[in-house]
């Protein structure tokens, strides 16, 4: 499935904004969103350096793998 098809079939798109989410809550919040049917997750971390954002993204990847929706889940890392 290409990106356009993924977006058009998506029923729930979520954003985890690190401006509002404490870093220690990143995984629990993401797990709850995925459990609720999230198909696309955007990690938004405007005030973090690219290496830190990549590290957070690597922490999130296993969450998507461990959900039943992995085949149709996408994690978008928004770099500054």
Image (cartoon, rainbow, N blue to C red):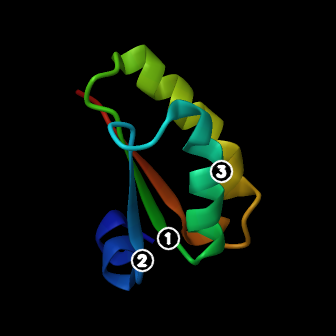
Residue 36 picture quarter? bottom right
Residue 41: give x, y in percent of width and height: 44, 57
Tell me if residue 45 comes above or below residue 63 in the rendering: above
Gap between marks 2 and 1 measured at Cα: 6 Å
Q: Earlier in the sequence, mark 2 or mark 1?
A: 2
Q: Is residue 35 left or right of 66 when viewed as pictured?
A: left
Q: Earlier in the sequence, mark 3 or mark 2?
A: 2
| Quadrant the N terminus occupies | bottom left
The residue that appears at 72% across and 65% down in the rendered structure is 67
**Looking at the rendered structure, which numbered label has been put on residue 12?**
2
Question: In the depicted view, which residue is nearer to us: 62 or 6?
Answer: 62
Tell me if residue 10 comes above or below residue 58 in the rendering: below
Q: Earlier in the sequence, mark 3 or mark 1?
A: 3
- Residue furthest to the right: 66
Residue 66: give x, y in percent of width and height: 77, 58
Q: Which residue is mark 1?
A: 39
* Label 1, residues with CA under 10 Å away: few <14, some 14-19, many ≥20: many
Q: Are marks 3 and 2 in contact (CB under 8 Å)?
A: no
Question: In the depicted view, which residue is nearer to us: 5 or 64?
Answer: 64
Q: Is residue 8 left or right of 65 when viewed as pictured?
A: left
Tell me if residue 55 comes above or below residue 29 in the rendering: above
Residue 65: give x, y in percent of width and height: 71, 55
Picture mark count:
3
Q: From the image, state whether disc 3 or disc 1 is nearer to you.
A: 3
Q: Which residue is mark 3?
A: 28
Q: Is residue 44 left or right of 24 when viewed as pictured?
A: left
- Which secondary structure lies at badge 3? helix
């Amino acid at each position: 499935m290409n990106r356009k098809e993924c977006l058009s079939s998506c029923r729930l798109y979520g954003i985890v904004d690190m401006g509002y989410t404490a870093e220690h809550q990143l995984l629990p919040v993401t797990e709850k969103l995925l459990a609720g049917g999230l198909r696309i997750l955007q990690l938004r971390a405007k005030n973090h350096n690219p290496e830190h954002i990549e590290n957070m993204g690597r922490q999130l990847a296993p969450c998507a793998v461990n959900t039943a929706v992995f085949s149709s889940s996408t994690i978008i890392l928004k770099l500054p």
